[in-house]
Image (spheres, helix red, strand yellow):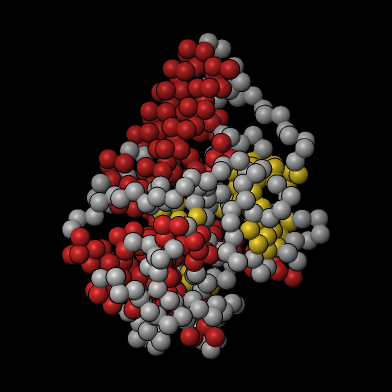
């Protein structure tokens, strides 16, 4: 059953317009077209029914996300049928810069980067013919051809994760395409993570400047452990987890781990090592140019949790307001010795779930408030960490 869910999820999440989900509807009669649309919608919806996955929280979340997007496509298809434009080619906006690949074209807002890193810049864009959030993309371009290897590595890692689907796929960027600019710089295109904030931005918000309440912090940690646990199962270490790369979708209670440019694949076999050091969030073995292990990523997650809770990740000081059992659990991630800290993300994940239930009883959904963000891809510019 999960294989069918995964296939349907990918089909829906890769689509950029209603026609790519429901296919051609040839009747000229609007009522008949609506009836055909509803039949196709119901057939697809059966495969992404969250009620079929009550025993698997990650699969349930995957189904919920797919069904939500499917309903948006259905609503848009109804509008198009009513307007008599379903299946018609959308005229291109000539006023925007367009990147073309073998797959499709993309409008890109190049007025200013959406965000900038050490090796690349990220711009917001939209697929030509794409609609609403389905067509919104993040376009990441290397600053210099000398930095292409980082983008090439990120594309490789995201493709490995994509080819090894699981319920945790919702925690990874969805790669859609790649390209090369005229001056030889590589670029990758991923689905934009809309209406979301990185952890730095959350901590800067008024309600959370002293720290995120522990009942919310633990679900963020749970999502991060699930994501990195899946990556480790695929032989991948992230090697650069820090708050800027932890993107939180507050309404969905989801966390997406970003920026896999520094990741390693099966480092024991390939010899791939560390390529970046974060003074606060990197484990000691990174600066010492040791070998990446799963414990390296878990150290960074522990440091991130200290920051999320309002503590000091430099000194490992966790606020006294945090429950002692939870505080000790988090500190087990940031032991200096590579072999002395937490080693297994999935084991830690289940330990965390057990701890949560022992402290507060069965898990319940609690709304995590952050203001919704402006969704106009031409106007939106998030606040960046200084």
Q: Between 122 and 77, which is closer to the camera in this rendering?
A: 122
Relative to 130, does residue 76 appear above or below in the rendering? above
Q: Between 247 and 76, which is closer to the camera in this rendering?
A: 247
Q: Between 115 and 139, which is closer to the camera in this rendering?
A: 115
Can residue 226 be seen in the rendering of this structure?
A: no
x and y percentages locating residue 360 in the rendered image: 20, 60
x and y percentages locating residue 85 in the rendered image: 61, 20
x and y percentages locating residue 183 in the rendered image: 81, 59
The part of the image, by quadrant, that contains residue 146 is: bottom right
Q: Residue at x 59, y 43 (%)?
A: 136
Q: Between 215 and 144, which is closer to the camera in this rendering?
A: 215
| Left or right of residue 97, residue 131 in this image | left
Q: Residue at x 32, y 79 (%)?
A: 332
Q: Residue at x 59, y 53 (%)?
A: 382
The part of the image, by quadrant, that contains residue 231 is: bottom left
Relative to 29, does residue 262 appear above or below in the rendering? below
Q: Residue at x 23, y 67 (%)?
A: 355
x and y percentages locating residue 301 in the rendered image: 42, 71
């Amino acid at each position: 059953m999960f294989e069918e869910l995964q296939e349907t999820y990918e089909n829906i999440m890769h689509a950029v317009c209603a026609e790519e989900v429901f296919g051609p509807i040839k009747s000229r009669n609007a009522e008949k077209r609506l009836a055909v649309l509803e039949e196709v919608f119901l057939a697809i919806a059966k495969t992404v029914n969250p009620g079929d996955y009550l025993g698997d929280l990650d699969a349930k979340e995957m189904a919920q996300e797919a069904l939500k997007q499917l309903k948006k496509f259905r609503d848009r298809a109804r509008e198009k049928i009513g307007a008599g434009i379903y299946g018609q080619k959308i005229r291109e906006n000539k006023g925007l810069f367009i990147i073309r690949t073998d797959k499709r074209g993309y409008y890109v807002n190049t007025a200013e980067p959406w965000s900038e890193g050490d090796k690349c810049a990220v711009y917001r864009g939209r697929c030509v013919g794409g609609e609403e959030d389905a067509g919104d993309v993040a376009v990441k371009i290397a600053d210099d051809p000398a930095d292409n290897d980082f983008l090439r590595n990120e594309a490789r890692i995201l493709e490995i994760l994509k080819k090894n689907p699981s319920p945790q796929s919702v925690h990874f960027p969805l790669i859609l395409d790649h390209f090369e600019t005229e001056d030889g710089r590589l670029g990758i295109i991923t689905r934009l993570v809309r209406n979301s904030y990185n952890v730095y931005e959350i901590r800067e918000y008024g309600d959370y400047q002293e720290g995120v309440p522990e009942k919310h912090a633990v679900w963020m940690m749970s999502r991060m452990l699930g994501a990195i646990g899946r990556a480790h199962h695929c032989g991948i270490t992230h090697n650069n987890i820090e708050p800027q790369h932890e993107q939180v979708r507050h309404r969905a209670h989801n966390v997406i781990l970003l920026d896999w440019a520094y990741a390693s694949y099966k480092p024991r076999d390939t010899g791939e090592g560390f390529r970046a050091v974060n003074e606060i969030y990197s484990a000691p073995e990174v600066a010492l140019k040791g070998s990446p292990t799963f414990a390296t990523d878990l150290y960074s997650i522990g440091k991130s949790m200290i920051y999320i809770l309002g503590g000091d990740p430099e000194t490992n000081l966790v606020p006294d307001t945090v429950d002692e059992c939870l505080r000790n659990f988090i500190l087990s991630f940031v032991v200096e010795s590579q072999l002395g800290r937490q080693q297994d993300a999935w084991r830690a994940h289940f330990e965390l779930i057990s701890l949560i239930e022992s402290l507060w009883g069965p898990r319940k959904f609690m709304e995590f408030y952050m203001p919704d963000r402006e969704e106009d891809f031409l106007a939106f510019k998030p606040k960046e960490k200084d």
